Image: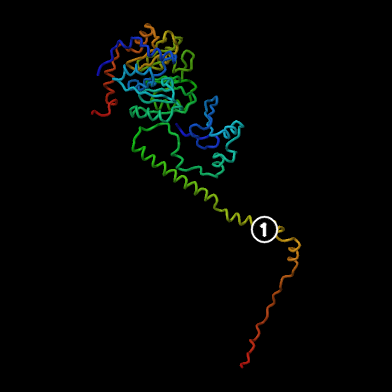
Amino acid sequence: MRLEKCWFCSSTVYPGHGIQFVRNDAKIFRFCRSKCHKNFKMKRNPRKVKWTKAYRRLHGKDMTQDSTFEFERKRNRPERYDRNVAEKTLMAIKKIDKIRVAREARHHKMRMKGKPAIERQAALTELEKSINLVKAPASLLQESQITPKIKVKIAESQPVERMEE
Amino acid sequence: MSTLPVKQNSKPFLSPLHSAAALVPRLSSPLFVARTLKVLAASDHGYYVFESELADVIPVVKTSIAGTRIVGRLCAGNKNGLLLPHTTTDQELQHLRNSLPDHVVVQRIDERLSALGNCISCNDHVALTHPDLDRETEELIADVLGVEVFRQTIAGNIVVGSYCAFSNRGGLVHPHTSVEDLDELSTLLQVPLVAGTVNRGSEVIAAGMTVNDWTAFCGSDTTATELSVIESVFKLREAQPSSIVDEMRKSLIDTYV
């Protein structure tokens, strides 16, 4: 039993799910559900379909290169079974998963980092453009016609002497 | 350790192999790996013939490949390594790795032509391959099996692994191989070759018999003439496994209890 990856969306295909298609050149395509299978039959390129992992990786939405991905590669030269190694591997799997999740979260955070600044800038431009939704254009015009107050400098007068009572 | 009696090589085999030969029209289940070290057998009725003959000489490993019992046609091996198709499951791969000694490299290959037993025919020094094999596969063969690789056809057939069987001492090829081809192959492989048949005139040699340096197993339909040809070309009459296996004893036994 082996948990394969869907060719289209890269999600895991568990036993009892999905369809495998074997092409005439002996290449095997595994699909997790009919959605992916139908998209494949429509000859859609997964790299252009927004919800697939291939798209997300290509457009930098998800982490592409990381050392944690190396652990999941398929190996063709097995090693002799050793119980200790197997035990340690099981513990390592859990830890590696945790680390990978943490790194993906960090990647997401870095990606979203400049968001408040961008939002503020967008709000300002929006305000300038669509001010007519807030204040009527006539009143805006009036405001611009009102002469601004003129400030005049006055020499400081002597303080008034108080009559002492 | 008892030596194998010579006469067993010249006896046609018993009915269990016949039924195996009937179900799967060729004797496609066994494979001698490492030429002298192990036998991989399909884990159903055919195997106990191998176990009864070979169990005290070399370990017999019961396995399936890609869930099938046609192990001999799917994998190719010699004393240095074993090549398996990409359809081999991880569990089977691990089982083989655990059962074989450490110096035998077990490798799974990503190759379009996945019946490696039909595409690759090899002994410990030379391999003949299907001419359409990938270059990376050819390099892997040279690397894992430690052999010199030749892309060849036999009697015009590209499926070399099934139309010839050779060991370190001799070889049997498709009956329609011309004399010039035979000479050419003989010089390539550096072993004496004979064009012959197996299983009452079947041209598919390697699917009807399995051979290593000191013994051979043929389908029960093989006639006495064919058997004598096989015996003479593979030099089985004088071969005694005792001498060869004594040398290999160290690699067969891990610890003395």
Residue pointed to by mark 1: A127
Determine the chain carrying the residue at label 1. A
User: Can residue B196 be seen at all in this image of the molecule?
Assistant: no
User: Can residue A103 be seen at all in this image of the molecule?
Assistant: yes
Residue B120 pos. (x, y %):
43, 21
Left or right: where does residue B101 sit relative to residue B136? left
Residue B172 pos. (x, y %):
40, 13
The colour scheme used to paint the residues is: rainbow
Q: In which quarter of the image is residue B13?
A: top left
Q: How crowded is mark 1: few (under 14 residues within 10 Å), some or many (20 or more)?
A: few
Q: Does B195 appear above or below B139?
A: above
Describe the element under mark 1 as helix, strand or loop.
helix
What residue lies at 43% left-to-right and 39% top-to-bottom? A71
Observer-nearest of B133 and B27 = B27
Left or right: where does residue B57 sit relative to residue A5? left
Q: Does B3 appear above or below A124?
A: above
Please state, as top left, top right, bottom left or bottom right, where the C terminus of chain B lies in the image: top left
Residue B220 pos. (x, y %):
38, 10
Residue B227 pos. (x, y %):
36, 9
What residue lies at 50% left-to-right and 22% top-to-bottom? B132
Q: Which amino acid does label 1 sit on?
A: Leu
Observer-nearest of B47 and A47 = B47
